[in-house]
């Protein structure tokens, strides 16, 4: 009887002890963290599905055979997968030659933008000159103003490029994009200047002062010291520029850049070319060839991102885009 009376007293004493409170708190916190992790996982999976579902559908459809395309029971996984869509897309896209010219054009414009935008961003970050704030406001304006609002002036500028009777038509060539990039007005150049400006402002001025003491001038300090230290910003801008130039449709359509230079423009006519050449009349089957072409065009962009992913994320964090 005495033992049975002591058990409730011991239990009440244990419940009132600090050890019991600590264990209870840990159990509650563990349960709470587990529920939060579960709901976080569900949300991430849902968002990922919304984003990736169209891409998964395109990749899956590109392997569909003719039987799969007309079978209502086949939804995502093909029963009789085939590479015939890719063989036809590679043939009529003239894939490797045009992809090589596209990468050459995109890389050239990217390098030009890196040089010009980094110089402009460094100038705004380090030097004082008249109307500096006003000019930087125009840089910000380049970011927020839609390109569609200046489409007609851009077209007329390069349709009649020059002065007086010495005008020349630069349309149907990549020269308009090259000229705009050389003057810091290319595709998204305002954003790139802003990124470099934010990054250079974060570097200590003592680096330049030490270079000045050693006898380095402004150009030598920039190219030998400041630019190598700006590798995170360079990687960020390079990835942005490569991807946006590769996928550009605004300048490509405005300046009528030939599809022999930009593979994305060649993709627009792929369905019509295959339909006429191979006598494919069903819209469903035509779409399968287009899906294969989309996958082929996406492959270089995905490879670029996978190769530079880590340094790209570090560059975004250090360049001041997110805060």
Image: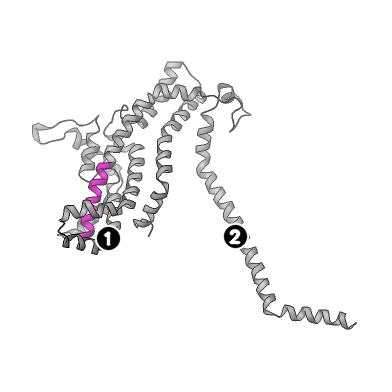
Total label count? 2
- Disc 2: which residue: 36
- Mark 2: which secondary structure? helix
Q: Position of residue 110 (x, y in %)?
A: 29, 41
| 303 or 150: nearer the viewer | 303
Which is nearer the N-term, disc 1 or disc 2? 2
Q: Residue at 23% x, 39% y: name it.
A: 154
- Mark 1: which secondary structure? helix
Image quadrant in which the N terminus is located: bottom right
> What segment carries the magenta color?
111-126
The answer, for residue 264, to whether it is visible in the render is yes
- Disc 1: which residue: 201
Query: How busy is the neighbourhood of tag 1: few (under 14 within 10 Å), some, or many (20 plus)?
Result: some
Left or right side of 290 for 196: left
Query: How busy is the neighbourhood of tag 2: few (under 14 within 10 Å), some, or many (20 plus)?
Result: few
Q: Position of residue 80 (x, y in %)?
A: 59, 24
């Amino acid at each position: 009887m005495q033992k049975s009376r002591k058990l409730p007293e011991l239990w009440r004493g244990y419940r009132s002890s600090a050890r019991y409170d600590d264990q209870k708190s840990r159990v509650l916190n563990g349960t709470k963290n587990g529920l939060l992790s579960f709901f976080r996982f569900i949300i991430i999976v849902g968002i990922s599905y919304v984003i990736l579902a169209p891409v998964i559908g395109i990749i899956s459809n590109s392997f569909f055979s003719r039987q799969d395309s007309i079978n209502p029971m086949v939804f995502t996984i093909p029963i009789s997968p085939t590479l015939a869509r890719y063989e036809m897309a590679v043939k009529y896209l003239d894939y490797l030659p045009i992809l090589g010219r596209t990468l050459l054009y995109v890389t050239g414009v990217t390098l030009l933008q890196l040089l010009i935008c980094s110089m402009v961003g460094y100038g705004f970050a380090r030097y004082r000159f008249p109307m500096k704030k006003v000019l930087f406001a125009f840089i910000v304006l380049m970011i927020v103003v839609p390109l569609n609002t200046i489409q007609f002036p851009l077209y007329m500028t390069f349709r009649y490029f020059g002065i007086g009777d010495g005008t020349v038509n630069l349309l149907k060539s990549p020269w308009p994009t090259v000229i705009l990039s050389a003057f810091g007005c290319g595709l998204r150049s305002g954003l790139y200047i802003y990124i470099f400006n934010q990054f250079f402002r974060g570097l200590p001025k003592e680096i330049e002062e030490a270079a000045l003491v050693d006898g380095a001038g402004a150009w030598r300090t920039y190219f030998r010291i400041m630019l190598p230290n700006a590798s995170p910003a360079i990687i960020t801008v390079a990835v942005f520029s490569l991807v946006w130039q590769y996928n550009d449709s605004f300048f490509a359509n405005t300046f009528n850049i030939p599809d022999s230079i930009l593979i994305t423009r060649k993709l627009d006519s792929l369905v019509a070319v295959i339909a006429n050449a191979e006598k494919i009349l069903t819209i469903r089957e035509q779409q399968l060839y287009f899906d294969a072409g989309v996958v082929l065009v996406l492959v270089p962009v995905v490879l670029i991102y996978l190769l530079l992913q880590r340094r790209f994320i570090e560059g975004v964090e250090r360049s001041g885009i997110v805060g």
